[in-house]
Image: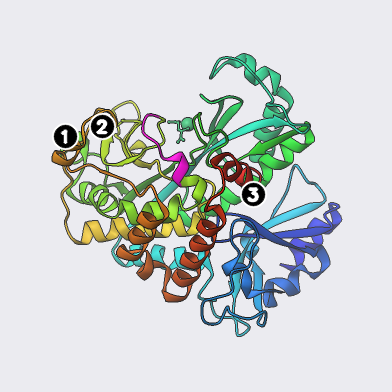
Amino acid sequence: MRQTAERLAEDGVVGLIVAWADNNGIPRSRTIPIEQVPLAAERGVGVSPLFAVFDTHDGITYGPPGLSTPSGDVRLVPVAERIVRLAGQPGFAWAPGRQMNADGSCWPYDQRGVLERQVEAAARAGLEFRAGYELEFRLSREDGPLAVAGPSYSPRLMLEVDGFAAQVMGDLRANGVEIGQLHAEYGPAQFELNIAPADPVTAADLQLLTRQTVHAAARAHGLRACFAPLTDGARVGNGWHLHTSVTRDGVNLLSGGDGPHGLTADGAAYLAGLLRDLPSIAAITAPSVASLLRLRPGFFSSAYAFWGVENREAALRFVPSTDLLGAAHANVELKPSDASANPYLSLAVVIAAGLAGIADGLVPPPPVQEDPGPWTDERRAAAGIHRLPATFEEQHAALNGGLARAVLGEELFGAFTVVRAADHAWAQGRPVDEVIAAHLWRY
Ligand code: GLU
Ligand code: MG
């Protein structure tokens, strides 16, 4: 660690940004002088425990036991093996942080620790997961207007943000983030980049690092990147779809089986496990007031709990392998997922639901290949298709009725639900446009 810090200092790095994501998916950070990094890697730096109960609008929601007063201290410890010099902010290096008790044990509100526990549970079952995020975002000029106008997916739009696009691709590579592609998306001035799959904790770390990298590249070119779940109530939102696959002994369980579309029995059970707990999962992976506004039928964001093969309206889109693409390609895409989710908690609940599905030997219903949005309520009910939670009350019930409590643990679950209630209270009675606007620059 001392050598890493010295090398960075020699290269002109003056500080280490230690970042974590709070219960609103909002990155928070501390910056440590580079010469103090070796000590901080051992002891951490002090932060307030109250970050666990910050709401989306920086309101501090005193409440749960242990978080009801301004007193207390948590140690924020940089994850040493993840330190990377930021190509877009050459004076700084970056690392994700662990939140620890003063005795060095994992603080129960540490979201990264929650995911580590699920990865360990998977390993005990002989399973490994791979995960990758797609990030959609809207680019605007620093002075306000959208950065580009023109046809969706157009290379001309890419030309208009050429400097940004070149910098973000180069900086991501330099920062150790491999991406699959970058393109102009469907919405006005909307873009998307896909992060290559990795193990779950790495995938969540890289999602945070990618945000910082995109913001820096945008700023260098007079632009602002908006990651909010919804930027305009009438248009498509920004989905941060989460792709996962599960392997045993290196073999992808979502491919090469005798089941439909190449699913193995365990692969099908994984999918069925996600489907069973989808309302509860979505309350973690698309948790904000803006998330609920984004999940509308007909916007490819998903509104109903069902799965389909390559169905872009499905909350769970199964992407099968083919001879051309190979077994590793098969994965499940979770659509109700966005920037307001904590990526560690998202992956933790997805893994837990999938493991439970496999343990219970669940069998999924047949896939749905249509958009059930225009169907009658009766037809959807007959097909077992339900609306994902669309109100705070439905979300609250799903959270309390599902697996999230056990996965997050009693303390963190308490903080998470208190924060959701605070966000809901904030939004009550405000016009939708004001609610959308208040989320635009939070992520
Ligand atoms: N923008 C859509 C969403 O809100 C996703 C579009 C797509 O399928 O890429 O999730
Ligand atoms: Mg997309």
Distance between mark 3 and mark 2 Cα atoms: 33 Å
Residue denoted by label 2: 372
Task: Give the secondary structure at mark 3.
Answer: loop
Residue at screen point 26% across, 41% down: 306
Q: How far apart are marks 2 and 1 (CA)?
A: 9 Å
Q: Is disc 2 in contact with disc 1, using a CB cutoff of under 8 Å? A: yes
Q: Residues within 10 Å of mark 3 (few under 14, many from 20)?
A: some
Please tell me whether residue 141 is drawn above or below residue 366 in the rendered image.
above
Whether 192 is drawn above or below 174: the answer is above
Quadrant in which the N terminus appears: bottom right
Is the shortest distance between ligand 1 and the CB of mark 3 under 8 Å? no
Q: Give the range drawn in magenta.
A: 292-298
Which type of secondary structure does the marked residue at label 1 adopt?
Answer: helix
Q: Which of marks 1 and 3 is nearer the N terminus?
A: 1
- Three-letter amino acid code of the residue under disc 2: Pro
Foreground pick, 414 / 252: 414
